[in-house]
Image: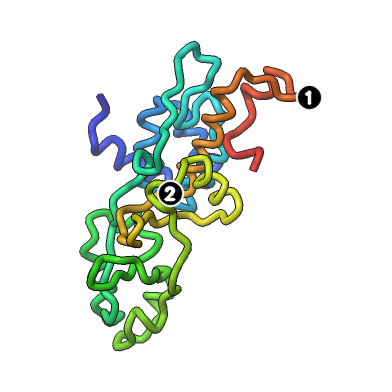
Amino acid sequence: MREENDIEKLVRTLRARAPDDAAELLARESPEFIRDALKLLPDRHARKVAEHLPSQRGPIKSHTDGKDLAIPEAIVELMDPIPASVAVGTTVAAAIEAVRRAQVPTELTYLYITDEGDRLVGLVVLRDLMLSEADATVDQIMLASPFALHVDMPLSEACKAAVRRHYPVYPVVDAENRLLGQVRGWRLFEQQIIEISAQPGQMVGVQKEERSFTPLFSAF
């Protein structure tokens, strides 16, 4: 099993490379290692790198490898913890400090804003946060009532939402709009590929050889 610092060392290298070069380097690794590395990359860069991975080396298993595909059936199976969130009324200065204290700041795309009941009320893009006045509050700069995935939403519907919106990250909420976690956009695109790969494979006008070497996400 690879050491954790091996992944961190590779991630630093991947961050410094163009997506196609990073994908070429990452393609030498196992699917499990690829998945772990992509999770540690910034969301936008992770998706661009994944787009350049050949399907047989992507963070999923092809139906041609003779193994059954373990297809997640619920959003919670793809969900990651929230890296950072702050309460309504928090100042920009305090919010920036919360970002700095985040356990994995490289995974931050949005800072989520919640009310006293942990309900999602908005989000702030990190660039907007850093450029705002220190004494302003997050309420003044947040995107209110952002789109969110419901934890009980069928995974197929969540994938369709990702195809339409192309957001890098999607917050996940429960029926009371309480913030539970987040799902990266590339994970949802990955599930689309899994569903296609798990089918018998009769794609009109596409030969087996073409399917085997089509890069991830090229259909989107």
Q: Relative to residue 4, is residue 213 depicted above or below?
A: above
Along the viewing direction, whichever of 13 and 66 lies nearer the viewer: 66
- Whole-percent x, y for residue 123 in the image: 39, 69
What's the CA distance linking mark 1 and mark 2?
32 Å
Q: Is 66 displayed left or right of 103 in the figure?
A: right
Q: Toward the viewer: 10 or 167?
A: 167
Image coordinates of residue 114 in percent, x first then y, are 30, 69
Which residue is label 1 attached to?
A: 205
* Residue 138's disc number: none
Residue 99 visible from this viewpoint: no
Split into 4 quadrants, where in the image is the N terminus?
top left
Residue farthest to the top, as pictured: 66
Q: Quadrant of residue 51?
A: top right
Label 1 sits on a secondary structure element that is loop
Task: Determine which residue is flagged by label 2.
Answer: 184
Which quadrant would residue 127 be assigned to in this image? bottom left
Relative height, residue 85 to residue 186 (above, below): below
Which residue is rendered at x = 41% and y = 27% of the image? 31
- Residue reaching furthest front? 175
Under mark 1, the amino acid is: Gly
Graded by Cα atoms within 10 Å as few (under 14), some (14 to 19) or many (20 or more), the crowding at tag 1 reads: few
Question: Residue 3, position in %: x, y?
Answer: 23, 32
Residues at marks 1 and 2 touching, judged by CB atoms closer than 8 Å: no
